[in-house]
Image (tube, rainbow, N blue to C red):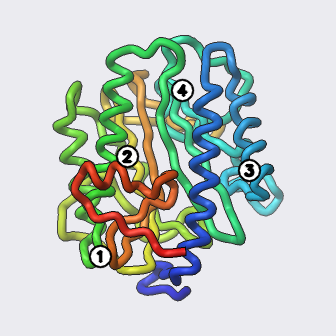
Amino acid sequence: MFRSRGIEIKTDDQLRLMRRAGLVVAEFLDAISAQARPGVTLRELDQVGRDVLAHHGADSNFLEYGADSRGLGGFKGVACLSVNQVIVHGMPTDEPLADGDILSIDGGAIIDGWHGDAARTVQVGTPSPANQALAEATEGAMWAGIAAARLNGRIGDIGAAVEAYATSAPGGPYGIVREYVGHGIGTEMHQAPDVPNFGRAGKGPRITRGMAFCIEPMLTLGEPDNAVLDDDWTVVTLDGRPAAHWEHTVTCTAQGVWVLTAHDGGEEMLGRLGVPFGPLAD
């Protein structure tokens, strides 16, 4: 491992360790999604995530994130659980889910010092057509960004693809949250470079072999303007309209794109999009 202009460059073996962490994250999201039903509390869902991490001997990269030197102010869960108008960083509480809620689940894992991070949005009980369309548009925007990633391309290619998809998706145009962006990842959860969900193709850092980064659009049904609540974590839309969030950890190899937090490495979706699939051999 070394750094190029502040960006951490991994060896193939280090990327394989990140893949191990990514598979734990995929299971983590599956388990929480399966239990997201009316009457279940956010704290109960967080415990589901804790159980998955414990089963795999993985550490959480969310729990106590941001704590100061006295151990105060850190995030109090292993998952960000963001309901309805909460965009990101929803804290696990005793609030029960209700039929028709839209829930974004963001979680991560650390294996042997290497991080994985991913998010998805699910419908609780009977989905509203508008919330379903929002979640599908956000997932589609994420995959558009992933499909735009390639060796020797630019980070701006990703943001431009996300923005183009979000502004033309059915049911839209959707609000694109600009204050919270994707990021590099490796020995820390948040690293250089920033990966915005908007911008111009051909701009930004060059994508090189050994880089790993998270692509994570956050879209809203209304305006993207937002505020942080008094807990210093929970980010909500100012107009009270719902939001959705999808994320994957991605790297580009000589063969193509490898989605480290997808069970199949992204093979199925990349195939649909006509993008080369690039896993590293074990």
- Residue 119 drawn above or below residue 14: above
Dot 3, how many residues are within 10 Å of its Cα: few (below 14), some (14-19), or many (20+)?
A: many
Viewport quadrant of the C terminus: bottom right
| Type of the residue with mark 3 | Leu
Viewport quadrant of the N terminus: bottom right
In primary-sequence order, the first of circles 4 and 1 is 4
Give the secondary structure at mark 1: loop
Q: Give the residue at mark 4.
A: 83
- Residue 178 drawn above or below residue 21: above
The residues bearing labels 4 and 1 have C-alpha atoms spaced at a distance of 36 Å
Q: Give the residue at mark 3.
A: 53
Residue 7 visible at all:
yes
> With 47 as the anchor, is 140 left or right in this view?
left
| Type of the residue with mark 2 | Pro
The residues bearing labels 1 and 2 have C-alpha atoms spaced at a distance of 21 Å
- The disc label shown at residue 151, or none: 1
Provide residue 261's location: percent of width, then percent of height: 51, 55
Q: Give the residue at mark 2.
A: 217
Dot 2, how many residues are within 10 Å of its Cα: few (below 14), some (14-19), or many (20+)?
A: many
In primary-sequence order, the first of circles 1 and 2 is 1
The residues bearing labels 3 and 1 have C-alpha atoms spaced at a distance of 32 Å
Give the secondary structure at mark 2: loop
Give the quarter of the image for residue 279. Answer: bottom left
